[in-house]
Amino acid sequence: MGREAKKLLWKPGTMLYPLPAVLVSCGEYGGTKNLITVAWTGIVCTEPPMCSISIRPQRHSYGLIRAGGEFVVNLTNAAMARAVDWCGVKSGRDFDKFREMKLTPLPARHVGAPLVAESPVNLECRVRQVRPLGSHHLFVAEILAVHADPRYFDARSGLFDLAAARPLCYCHGHYYEMGRHIGKFGFSVEKKRQKGKKRKAKVKQKA
């Protein structure tokens, strides 16, 4: 008989990791604005493009997002790790987080909330639903525009190379820089197709 794998049984918890560590900007570009660090975020729909963020109602940014109905998801990288952590433990009630972390606000195209210039990718979002879940409320928002830093475009392919930006991830209380590239979406099927083509080519050569 084979050896049975034994696993520890834990109580229910938020053990879905890793997660992107993002800075969510809210408020107004030329007025009261703030940044909040969020790890509980993700894509929820393709058409129309939509994402979600979860925030505790006690957080300063919660009120700004409820009032404005808009926010910007700013992806972060390893160079922004200190700012990401600081903005997650300090309150916008007490600090101007843009100024304290020397981050640069930029005007967005469709929303009043500012972009973070240092971010490799910014997603402008407009809230469509707010769902109270318990400790956190879920904001479901439509993505109105995406801004990408031209420094991370590959010169040969012309495609955006997010890996070159060294994206920052959050894993159970710790920050990590993303590791090496393993393959693109569909690479497992693509390899099989390539092998099939080689076999056909050999058959033709023999004929």
Image (tube, rainbow, N blue to C red):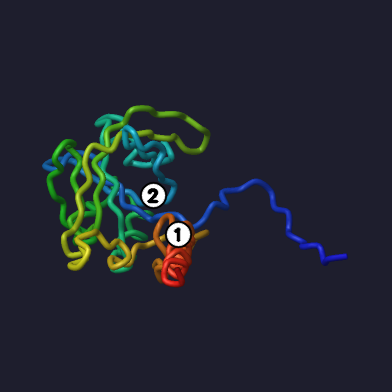
Query: Residue at position x 44%, y 47% from top?
Result: 40
Image quadrant for the C terminus?
bottom left
Q: Where's residue 91, x and y in %?
A: 33, 49
Frontmost of labels 1 and 2 is 1
- Mark sitting on residue 38: 2
Query: Residue at position x 47%, y 62% from top?
Result: 196
Q: Earlier in the sequence, mark 1 or mark 2?
A: 2
- Mark sitting on residue 193: 1
Proximity of marks 1 and 2: CB atoms separated by less than 8 Å = no
Q: Where's residue 2, x and y in %?
A: 83, 66
Q: Amino acid at mark 1?
A: Arg
Query: Residue at position x 70%, y 53% from top?
Result: 10
Q: Taking the image as drawn, is residue 82 in sight? A: no
Q: Where's residue 123, x and y in %?
A: 26, 45
Q: Is residue 119 left or right of residue 131?
A: left
**89 or 153, nearer to the observer:** 153
Establish if 8 lies above or below 26.
Answer: below
Q: Is residue 108 left or right of residue 77?
A: left
**188 or 69, nearer to the observer:** 188
Mark 1 secondary-structure assignment: helix
The crowding category of the residue bearing disc 1, from other C-alpha atoms within 10 Å (few below 14, some 14 to 19, many at least 20), is few
**125 or 65, nearer to the observer:** 125
Q: Taking the image as drawn, is residue 5 in sight? A: yes
Q: Is residue 142 left or right of residue 173?
A: left
